[in-house]
Image (cartoon, grey):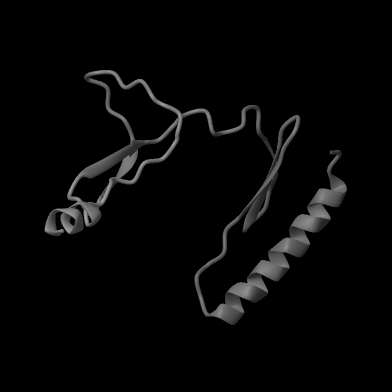
Amino acid sequence: MDKEKELAMIELPDYTMEKDMKLEVGVTYRGSFKLARTGMIVVKPYQEGAKPANLKKMVDGDRHAIYLSKNLVRIVISIQKGSREEVCKAYKTIILECYKNLNELAL
């Protein structure tokens, strides 16, 4: 019975069904790692190709930018840290500016 309890307490490593990457010797890769409960280090290299191609900056505001490609509109917003109310107010102002800019663009 003790043997069965020991087997029941064994934790299996976390497995994810991600696409395999071919890593080459001597190449530096960017990525992240985590320490599993078993003490194993799980390494996850960043995958390239996630960025859309041909993005062109169409609007360059003080706190936002709008990029366009054939099939994508990307809006980047930067807000100075502050209190919750200050951040919410800044966000609302920037969204209104973005809305005005989008109305002027030929999408």
Q: Which of the pair 3/59 is nearer the observer?
A: 3
The quarter holding residue 40 reads top left
* Residue in the image at 19% along x and 59% along y: 5
The answer to whether residue 8 is left or right of residue 91 is left
Instruction: Say which quarter of the image contains residue 51.
Output: top right
In the rendering, at what x and y percent does residue 60 appear?
66, 47
At horizontal 45% and vertical 34% (from top left) the residue drawn is: 18
Q: Quadrant of residue 27?
A: top left
Asked if residue 74 is positioned above or below residue 20 in the image, the reply reads below
In the rendered structure, the answer to whether residue 25 lies left or right of residue 45 reads left
Q: How many marks are shown on the rendered structure?
A: 0
Question: Which quadrant holds the N terminus?
Answer: bottom left
Q: Is residue 71 above or below residue 61?
A: above
Answer with left or right where residue 57 lies relative to residue 43: right
The percent position of residue 24, horizontal first and vertical second, equals: 28, 18
Q: Which residue is painted at 29% across and 39% down in the image?
A: 43
Left or right of 101 in this view: 79: left
Residue 63, percent across and down? Answer: 62, 58
Residue at the farthest left position: 2
Going by the picture, which residue comes out furthest to the front?
Answer: 1
> Quadrant location of the C terminus?
top right
Pick the front one: 8 or 17: 8
Figure check: 55 above or below 95: above
Residue at the spot x=45%, y=29% of the render? 19
Depth order, front residue of 34/65: 34
Q: Position of residue 76 (x, y in %)?
A: 62, 51
